[in-house]
Amino acid sequence: MAKAIMLQGTGSDVGKTVLVAGLCRAAKKRGLKVRPFKPQNMSNNAAVADIPGDKAGGGEIGRAQWLQAIACGVTPSVHMNPVLLKPQTDVGAQVIVQGKMFGEAWARDYQAMKGQLMDAVLDSWGKVGEGVDLIIVEGAGSPAEINLRSRDIANMGFATRADVPVVLVGDIDRGGVIASVAGTHLILPEEDRRMIVGYLINKFRGDVSLFDDGLKSIETFTGWRCFGIVPWLKAAGRLPSEDSVVLERLASGEARALKVAVPVLGRIANFDDLDPLKAEPQVEVVFVPPGKPLPADAGLVVIPGSKSTIGDLLKFRENGWDRDLLAHRERGGHVVGICGGFQMLGRMVRDPDGIEGSVTEAEGLGLLDVETVMEPEKTVRNVSARSVQYDLPLEGYEIHLGRTTGPDTLRPSAIINGIEDGAVSADGKVLGTYMHGLFGADGFRGKFLESLGIKSGGIDYRAEVERALDEVAAELETHLDCDAIFALAR
């Protein structure tokens, strides 16, 4: 079995995903065969990964492990994230195991389910470790959630079972980092505490010497060694974000030639579809939270994916965004709907089997003459396609339930594997597609922006992601004792 080290956080959103990606890239640059692993993830930002030996298509993993695999320079595999939870309600989620739909569970039911899921986690763990030098594992949430410890598969439950040493990550940007690190030490049972080989501090701004007394205090309380203090990583902003919690902090940047408005749906999914547009120097992407109107000066509105199309469609109307969208269209504005957003743009969404919940149909926004019927079988695949409008190559992935038909599908937006996909309005200003990653195609993005009167910055988006990973790795090499971290792997 490969050697391994695990990063666990004092809480959620402490920056583990980017740190693991950066350490993976740093290890790769040292010539190591390195792989990422996250036993359990909770996110509606999913990616399509290979299922070894399965020729039928792909399976779902968290977008974070997809990015970490890219950092390792390898093809993403479903075994890098064997359990993925995709929230559909505040207390219920779809459960994906080794890439495939396993079932649905309420939060309380899921706790009871974890015992049988550990077998899948350990099976994937063995597969990821075959023929490699190092695995860098990402925890989920915090090991200090001792109320959930007895059935844990994401943090210490996994670390103790697989005998993986742990580096604890504290987030100084949110405050209280001394208490969070020392408090974790205090409440962990001895079996878990002895797995921790040290800690690091993340997201530091300012003069690091001002925290010298803080480090002494943590050492006094815990006896743990510090592997370093990581500054606020600016390059991380150029990497795809996985957790929708970041949307709460996103503010509009400086005004630019084109404003793109994105309504933040309650079950928003795969919102990193917007990242290539955010990277364009003349494009300002504004994520609009519930309760705020869609900006009247937006030239483009993008309705992103959703894990609960009907539920988000009903909330869309409650927010008054349907009226804002019609006003936008009357001003000549453009609209793009991706996956669930495409379904919302039609006349009707029907869910006769109650796959998404108790509401079995809802009137759509009516900007495309199509209807969608939810069906149990999910489409999960990476795709290569061509834009019908510009005859340019596209590359992305599909993760969706439902079949969409209607007159506007006679004007498809793309051809995927020889099959027409999506729909375009008669005036060409409303486009719907099931394909995620649409704007990641540099040629298409350039032509699309031209149609809106904007000149593209000529960005190679995938190369930008690679450069950002290199920059993060370089920062970690500078500010962390990476030699010591890798040497403690076992």
Image (cartoon, grey):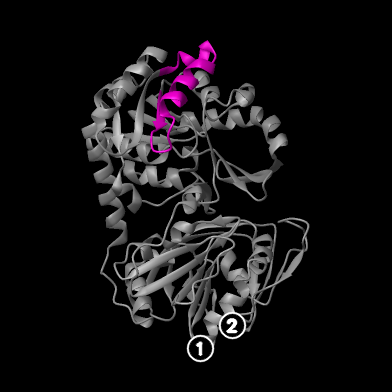
> Residue at 62% across / 26% down in the picture?
148
- Neighbourhood count class around disc 1 (C-alpha, 10 Å): few under 14, some 14–19, many 20 upward: few
**Where's the N terminus, which quadrant?**
top left
Whether 451 is drawn above or below 378: the answer is below
The circle drawn on residue 356 is none
Whether 375 is drawn above or below 344: the answer is above
Q: Is residue 154 magenta?
A: no
> Number of callouts in the render?
2
**Residue position for label 2:** 408
What stretch of residues is rendered in magenta? Answer: 167-196
Callout 1: SS: loop
> Residue at 54% across / 56% down in the picture?
269
- The image shows residue 315 at horizontal and vertical percentages of 66, 63
- Neighbourhood count class around disc 2 (C-alpha, 10 Å): few under 14, some 14–19, many 20 upward: many
Residue flagged by tag 2: what amino acid is it?
A: Asp
> Is residue 131 visible in this depiction of the protein?
no
Dividing the picture into quarters, in which one does residue 64 lie?
Answer: top left
**Residue position for label 1:** 427
> Is residue 377 visible in this depiction of the protein?
yes
- The image shows residue 411 at horizontal and vertical percentages of 53, 83
